[in-house]
Image (cartoon, helix red, strand yellow):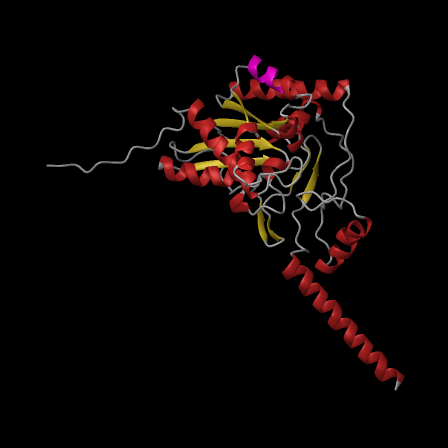
């Protein structure tokens, strides 16, 4: 009788675990997180050639670890337009933004249709990246034949230097979890029970760093060098300054905003910010922010609209549409 009860209990336990695994994987969307890898100069980046579904949303990276379609290092079509957009989790979109709804994907689709020629928009980003990460990425991969380079920076990027600390597997996993249920129990349940805040990427935000002179100098030197390298590679540069909810509510940018603006102006790089665009979405009842800094789907659309307007205004010659071949007449 005891053995029979144990068998039933084991059977019930197996069924419960199987049901829990199916629920966690296919209903919640766990078990398949985007993976990161350590890099000696960039600090970390997304592993290349990933195609995962997270919380029901597609997250895809190309051979360069960008959240973008794959493309060759050099153009094979002289009419192709290439735009590289550098940023952090704001540009990346995170797990809660489907690949199709990321601003860079929207810009690529729109320009491809409008210009009637091939367009590549690379999304070079990862959570908490700053100018030094972007510079290291360029030194590793180059500008990949880009015509335009866009830097999306927030006020905090004026002192955003990498620490090269070991990656926290709960924030930036480097290996897939053994199961979806196990990931839910070990990664998310403890935070739910303790009431920890989870950001747009589904992770606990990094601890806030205290600004120091070294980090400010490292970040500013990286900004200057990126501008110089872009010019040396005949790539036009553009800076977009992203405002947080705190800045929008105060109607005043935080410390660091003016420094980034000054460095861009010194390099004769056009500067735009998204304050008016984000405020317009807020006024229309379409909240663009998921939290204080990260963009939801509305915000990604707002960023895409700003990027398109800025590119067309600043670089009309580069964005000239391909002329349609007319029919010959006898």
**In the figure, 252 relative to 185: above or below?**
above
Give the quarter of the image for residue 36. top right
**Could you tell me if residue 96 is visible in this image?**
yes
The quadrant of the picture occupied by the C terminus is top left
* Residue 296 part of the magenta-drawn span: no
Q: Residue at x 68, y 55 (%)?
A: 30
Foreground: 273 or 223? Answer: 273
Q: Residue at x 65, y 47 (%)?
A: 34
- Name of the residue lying farthest toward the top: 266
Q: Magenta residues? A: 260-266
Residue 254 in picture, x, y percent from top left: 68, 23
Residue 185 in picture, x, y percent from top left: 77, 57
- Name of the residue lying farthest toward the bottom: 1
The kind of secondary structure the magenta stretch mainly shows is: helix
Q: Give the tally of numbered discs.
A: 0
Give the quarter of the image for residue 220. top right
Q: Is residue 17 left or right of residue 239?
A: right
Q: Residue at x 51, y 20 (%)?
A: 270
Residue 155 in picture, x, y percent from top left: 66, 25
Residue 35 in picture, x, y percent from top left: 67, 46
The quadrant of the picture occupied by the N terminus is bottom right
Q: Residue at x 66, y 26 (%)?
A: 250
């Amino acid at each position: 009788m005891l053995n029979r009860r144990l068998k039933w209990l084991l059977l019930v336990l197996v069924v419960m675990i199987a049901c829990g695994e199916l629920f966690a994987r296919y209903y919640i969307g766990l078990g398949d997180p985007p993976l990161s890898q350590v890099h000696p100069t960039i600090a970390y980046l997304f592993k290349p050639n990933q195609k995962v579904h997270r919380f029901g949303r597609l997250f895809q990276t190309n051979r360069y670890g960008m959240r973008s379609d794959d493309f060759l290092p050099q153009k094979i079509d002289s009419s192709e337009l290439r735009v590289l957009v550098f940023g952090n989790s704001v540009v990346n979109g995170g797990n809660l933004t489907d690949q199709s709804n990321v601003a860079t994907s929207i810009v690529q689709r729109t320009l491809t249709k409008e210009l009637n020629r091939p367009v590549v928009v690379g999304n070079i980003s990862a959570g908490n990246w700053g100018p030094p990460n972007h510079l290291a990425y360029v030194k590793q991969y180059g500008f990949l034949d880009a015509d335009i380079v866009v830097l999306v920076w927030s006020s905090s990027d004026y002192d955003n230097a990498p620490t090269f600390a070991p990656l926290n597997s709960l924030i930036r996993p480097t290996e897939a979890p053994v199961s979806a249920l196990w990931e839910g129990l070990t990664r998310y349940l403890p935070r739910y029970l303790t009431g920890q805040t989870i950001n747009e990427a589904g992770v606990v935000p990094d601890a806030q760093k205290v600004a120091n002179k070294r980090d400010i100098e490292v970040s500013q030197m990286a900004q200057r060098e990126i501008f110089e390298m872009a010019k040396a590679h005949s790539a036009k540069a553009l800076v977009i300054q992203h405002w947080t909810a705190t800045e929008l509510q105060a109607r005043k940018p935080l410390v660091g905003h003016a420094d980034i603006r000054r460095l861009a102006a010194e390099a004769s790089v056009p500067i735009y910010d998204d304050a008016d665009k984000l405020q317009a979405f807020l006024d229309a009842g379409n909240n663009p922010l998921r939290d204080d800094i990260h963009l939801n789907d509305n915000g990604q659309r707002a960023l895409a609209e700003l990027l398109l307007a800025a590119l067309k205004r600043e670089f009309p010659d580069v964005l000239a549409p391909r002329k349609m071949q007319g029919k010959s007449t006898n």
